[in-house]
Image (cartoon, helix red, strand yellow):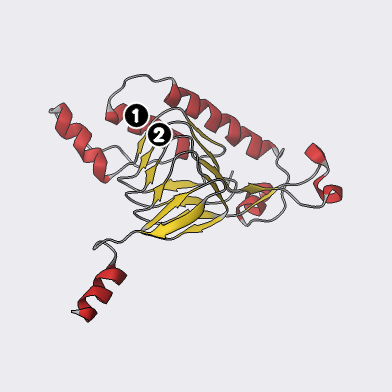
């Protein structure tokens, strides 16, 4: 896919042909991977992580198996997010999610361009992230006949995304609470974890 001309145009946010054979093949691959993930049932954290990595094309080897089930599950806290099914993503290969992040059920992501979600991010249920766009001019858009485009979405570390939020292309800064449809930053979270706030606090002492 990475070598496809249309794939490269898509990642750059340029107008591209969505029905390109390589793009279609990866969407089919991702759809089947999501289906396996969603239909797996009550499986171990290890199996869930393996199914998740199939969706996003993560080829890292899984951590060595530990005999104690609790200890085996615990080690994935340092390597993978927790994702509750059902989950849906368009391509998977353009999605990067940090460790310690929790993605609640019924999340849908259109990763036309790169979508990054940082570490320790919390998603409420029914979140939508839309990195896909279409030309405004109908003469260019031409329904299913015309090109598509996309923009990157970046959600930084320690962000809380409320339930049923729709996130459009752009950035969500760290240590912020986001809610609404479409999403907007509600307020900055006061926390000692923020190095900027910690520095400001020490200067006022």
Q: Label 2, label 1: how many angstroms apart (C-alpha)?
A: 6 Å
Percent x, y of residue 205: 18, 79
Q: Height in image: 10 above or below 53?
A: below
Q: Secondary structure at mark 1?
A: helix
- Dividing the picture into quadrants, the one containing residue 78 is top left
Q: Is residue 9 visible?
A: yes
Percent x, y of residue 154: 48, 55
Q: Residues within 10 Å of mark 2 (few under 14, many from 20)?
A: many
Front in this rendered view, residue 123 or 145: 123
Q: In screen coordinates, is 5 left or right of 188?
A: right
Q: Height in image: 64 above or below 97?
A: above
Q: Secondary structure at mark 2?
A: helix
Query: Residue tagged by mark 1?
Result: 48
Contact (CB < 8 A) between labels 2 and 1? yes
Front in this rendered view, residue 123 or 23: 123
Front in this rendered view, residue 1 or 105: 105
Q: Tell me the residue at 35%/42% (across/down).
A: 60
Query: Residue tagged by mark 2?
Result: 52
Q: Residues within 10 Å of mark 1 (few under 14, many from 20)?
A: many
Q: In screen coordinates, is 135 left or right of 55?
A: right
Percent x, y of residue 84: 38, 31
Percent x, y of residue 142: 83, 43
Quadrant for the N terminus, please: top right
């Amino acid at each position: 896919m990475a070598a496809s001309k249309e794939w490269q145009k898509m990642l750059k946010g340029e107008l591209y042909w969505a029905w390109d054979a390589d793009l279609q093949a990866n969407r089919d691959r991702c759809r089947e991977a999501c289906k396996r993930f969603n239909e797996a049932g009550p499986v171990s954290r290890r199996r869930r992580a393996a199914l998740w990595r199939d969706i996003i094309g993560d080829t890292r080897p899984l951590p060595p198996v530990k005999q104690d089930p609790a200890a085996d599950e615990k080690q994935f806290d340092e390597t993978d997010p927790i994702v509750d099914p059902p989950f849906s993503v368009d391509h998977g290969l353009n999605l990067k999610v940090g460790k310690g992040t929790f993605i609640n059920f019924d999340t849908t992501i259109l990763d036309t361009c790169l979508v990054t979600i940082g570490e320790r991010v919390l998603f409420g249920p029914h979140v939508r992230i839309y990195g896909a766009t279409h030309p405004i001019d109908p003469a260019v858009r031409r329904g299913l006949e015309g090109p598509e485009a996309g923009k990157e979405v970046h959600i930084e570390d320690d962000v809380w995304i409320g339930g049923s939020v729709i996130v459009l292309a752009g950035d969500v800064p760290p240590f912020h609470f986001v809610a609404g449809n479409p999403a907007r930053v509600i307020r900055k979270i006061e926390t000692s974890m923020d190095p900027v706030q910690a520095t400001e606090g020490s200067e006022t002492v």
